[in-house]
Image: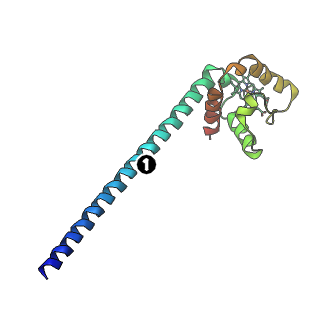
Amino acid sequence: MKKSIFVLALAALFFVSCGEKKKEEVKEIETVKEEVKETATEVVADNLELGKKLFTEKTCATCHNPDMKVIGPSIKDINKIYNEQNGNIVKFLKGESVAIVDTDPGQVAIMKANLDGFVKDMTGDELAAISAYMRSVK
Ligand code: HEC
């Protein structure tokens, strides 16, 4: 009788400690998950920050205002058309797709001069950051 109680107690202890361990593991996984999420958020934020900076430094901002047409269409108007037509801003900037926002030849030529002039020297990462920034303008 005593022996079986002892065995039971041991078993109980074993299960409790296993449970504790599981809980700790779950906690660790949760912590790692949190960290990954935070890092991802930081990466996205950094990318947007870079995109915003480039948008100004590379003079895009002189022709593209978030809300209203200046020389080029507003960022919001560009987003609207790109959403509707499932367009890809990076592709456009790389010269791999044609203009879909303002197809007036004079206007297209103005933007094309930028693409051929300096946008072609920008890296894929820079263009992706600019696109991410433009897309974030709501
Ligand atoms: C000198 C003025 C000017 C500058 C600088 C300029 N753009 Fe433009 N952009 C235009 C004009 C005009 C249009 C309208 C023609 C068109 O849609 O292609 C346009 C159109 C666009 C479009 C829409 C293209 C489409 O599908 O119709 C995007 C995206 C764009 N510009 C991004 C940029 C980015 C990014 C920069 C900076 C690297 C930039 N622009 C710099 C004048 C400019």
Residue 86 position (above or below residue 131): below
- Does mark 1 have its CB less than 8 Å from ligand 1? no
How crowded pointer 1 is (Cα within 10 Å; few <14, some 14-19, many 20+) is rated as: few
Where is the C terminus found, in terms of image quarters? top right
Q: Position of residue 91 (x, y in %)?
A: 74, 33
Q: Position of residue 76 (x, y in %)?
A: 68, 38
Ligand 1 location (quadrant) = top right
Residue at horizontal 77%, vertical 24%?
111
Q: Which residue is mark 1?
A: 33
Left or right of 49? Residue 10 is left
Q: Residue furthest top?
A: 117
Q: Position of residue 128 (x, y in %)?
A: 64, 32
Locate residue 118: give its quadrant: top right
Residue nearest the viewer, comparing 66 with 50: 50
Left or right of 35? Residue 127 is right
Left or right of 65? Residue 29 is left
Residue at horizontal 44%, vertical 42%?
38
SS assignment at label 1 = helix
The amino acid beneath tag 1 is Lys
Numbered circles on residues, count = 1
Q: Residue furthest front?
A: 3
Q: Position of residue 65 (x, y in %)?
A: 67, 29
Residue at horizontal 72%, vertical 44%?
83
Q: Residue furthest left?
A: 2
Where is the N terminus found, in terms of image quarters? bottom left
Locate residue 106: give its quadrant: top right
Residue 67 position (above or below residue 2): above
Left or right of 32? Residue 129 is right
